[in-house]
Image (cartoon, rainbow, N blue to C red):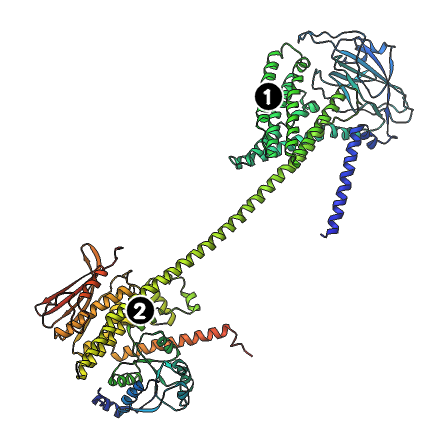
Amino acid sequence: MNLTPSARTLNHVSAAHIIEVGVVEDDPACRGLLTHAIMACDDMRLVWQAATLAEARRYLARSIDVLLVDIGLPDGTGLELIADIKAHQPECLVMVSTMFGDDNNLLSAISAGALGYLLKDVSATEVVEEIRSLHAGGSPINPMMARKLLSQKPAPIVAAKCADDARGQNEEDSVEMGRRALGLSHRETEVLQLVARGFILDEVASRIGITRHTARSYVRRIYQKLEVGSRAEAVRVAADSGLLTER
Amino acid sequence: MGILGRRIIIALSAVLALFAILLTIAIMADGSVIEQLVVRPSDAQRIMQAQRWISPSIIWEPPASIDTADDAVAAQHNWAQVKLPDSRLMHSSQPKTVRNGNRTLPTPPLVVWYKIAFDAVPAGSPDLRQIYLPRVFSEGTAALYVDGRLVWHTPMRYLFNPYNKPVLVTLDEQRAPDQARPHIIYIRLAARESDGGALSAIWLAQSNSLTRAFLARDFLQVGALEWTWYSYWVLGALSFVIWIRLRGTRESGLYFWFTATALLAFVPSLTQLSSDFAAVPDDILLWLWITGGYLLLICDIKFSAEIFGKRQPIFERLAVIVGLSGATYVSIFIALNSQKMLPNVIAEHVLLLLIIPFFLQFSYLCRAAFLFRTRRTLVIFALSVFALIALYHDLHFGGHAGGAEDLPWQPLNLPTSFIAYIVILFRSYVRSIEAADNATIALQQALRAKEAELGEQHQQLMRIQQEHTLTTERQRMMKEMHDGIGHSLVSALSFVRHGQKDPKVLTNVLEECIDDLKLSIDSLEPTVDDLLLLLSSLRYRLGSRLEGSGIKLHWEVTDVPPLPWLDPQYGMHILRILQEILTNLLKHSGADTLHFTTITHTRAERAGVLICIEDNGKPFTLPPLGKIQPGRKGLGNVISRTEMLQGHCQWQPLKAGNRFTLWVPLVRSVA
């Protein structure tokens, strides 16, 4: 495992400020890997680390740039922590660590405000690369995620609006439905479709004539739309159940 | 409306009905009740006494005036005092009847004169204005003379005299009030001796006060009957329309026979309304009356059978035979004899035959009433008993033994049976609607029961299917665990046990284990017939390892049609085949570039998709298929998995590199 910072990393230090990171992981081995990788970088600083939800909640007030969080924690889910950190530090970028990168929890995490994910079996180099990329405004994606985003069910209001022209079960329709559900632009939809066909973001970028960074920022925008959509849905549900009645 | 209001209405209706029944009975018992109710005694005078003389005249037609009478009636002094009403004018001392049956020599009539002398009206009071006869009956002619002048007479008829038509004569001549003078009224009746005649009391009035009495009696004796006829015909037409709609159903018979019955319902009362048929010859009316009676017998019995809902086939057949043969016989008899015989003679020959259908119908109804004892049969039986009594009454009256002012009873048959039939038809109509409603409800219940049953079966089927799916999936997972990660872990273990210390090799083996695991996980993803998504997950899992080995991957997939059969199991087969090939390439070819392509491709006339992997390394031949490679699951699986896909695979060493192709069909044939 190569923990030595690369030349590129060093250049980065001089150009930007230190990335302050928080880590929540219950498995000591994984946590060790992550913290070592972070501490080995000059451009990153491990501000705090926690093994449980309760422990992590104690650090909520401590300002960080990036939070690495495991979904499955002994005393709760990482999703709760995402909501908490978003409430305390809306600018904090959340990255979820996942075993396979395709589980439904990942989508829930993004809906809750996460903007990236990290596979648990990646090398230390890849860990820091992902953190940097996230901090620089990009988000990762994989074919399974793209597929799930494309087949998002629209919220009831949107569904009613597009019920006339998006009937049926075939792919065209479900893609169209997903596009409308999240309010995706055609370019964003195109990115998702190419990713679902197995192209990596670099290939997607060159295919549609954009830079790698732009492609990654598209993905981030999509995640943000998913979060906004889910927040709107939550507001709608709350309004329906009378929680928002004016006093 | 409250219950109290409804009770008041019912009580009022009952009182009214009772009153109507009592009035009807009173009028039926004594017809003069009508006049007593309507005429004020001060307005008119009822003459109950008259003088009668039986004339030797043999002339049917009445003379134009008293002065021109052949029997010099005005000069007669041999008058007998009689009470009015007077009937049964029989038994003349002179036997004048000659029955030769020859139409050219008509039977001479018995001529009877009545004379009423009306006292002189005192000067200053109005003169005699109206003469009203509730009934004059004569099977021949009848005529009324006032002061020697003919003021009213019937047409010459042997049969079908308008005896039910009351007579009202209003005198137009106005005399000077001071010219008080007496009036003499003559009434001449000419009829066959055997037929007789009758004369009611005579009403005289000095004003128009008798018109009301005339109208009341006219309505009761003629008008009501006519209205009943019309109502029958209207209902018959309605029933006919219903029959056309229902034709062919079980209910249709009721409406057909009601139509026929309604059409002929006027026949029995034809004699009572004969004044309206003055232009129709007697023999035609006689034919209509008797053949109509026979046909009505058939219709009545058929209609009754439909009402009862129970058949008496022998009676019904007998009715048809008797009805048709009777009608035919009478028609032929009248046609043959109408030139030779007078209508009344013909009537004597055929009338008696009517006893047969009458008896038949009566016994039919008796039997039905006795056998079925339903409310309907009893009502209809009661009606027919009443019809019998009415017939007796009217015949008795026709024989002039009864009061000449009595109303005939037979017309009452018509309205009563009319109401009864309406009620019965209405009830059967309502019942059929209810039956339809009930049928609908029963159908809905049956449907619901079937739905529930189907739902249960469906649930059961779903359970079985679910269990089957679970079992299959479990078996598949077991196989994948065994062939995939299980095998990889065993290999890794044996490496360590055999002293393998190189961390690079160990890392490689463990990475392979994780790849196997990831592919197994990915195969669980519902790819929904999307081959490219499946391949993209393969790239996602293995891509970084390929690039880590220094191989540049060119992803050159094109859109391919959906594969409907692509479920997790078949998806896993495809992933494993490609994984196996990629592993082999990595191990043996030493290539630095890899092209991954998909295209639609038709093979042996079957549409399909071709997956192609091409490298630029060292060409090599795969070991014999099926042989287990150390550390790997063996290429034998590639062949067996391809067979399961109904596909085709090929390994092809090139000049510089190797090419593997896997072809899968768009549609798998059912094994």
Dot 1 surroundings within 10 Å: few (below 14), some, or many (20 or more)? some
Mark 1 and mark 2: Cα distance apart in space? 90 Å
Residue B149's disc is none
Residue pointed to by mark 1: B322
Residue A243 % position (x, y): 51, 76
Q: Chain of mark 2?
A: B
Asked which secondary structure carries label 2, the reply is: helix
Q: In this orientation, which residue lies closer to the viewer: B424 or B524?
A: B524
- Residue B413 percent location from the top left of the image: 70, 29
Q: Which residue is mark 2?
A: B524
Pointer 1 chain: B
Mark 2 or mark 1, which is nearer the start of the sequence?
1
Above-or-below relation of B316 to B559? above
Task: Measuring from the top left, give residue B463's x and y in whole percent.
Answer: 40, 61
Query: Disc 2 residue type?
Result: Leu
Q: Against A33, is A177 above or below?
A: above
Q: Mark 1 falls on what kind of element?
A: helix
Residue extending furthest front?
B497
Total labels drawn:
2
Tell me whether marks 1 and 2 sit on the same chain.
yes
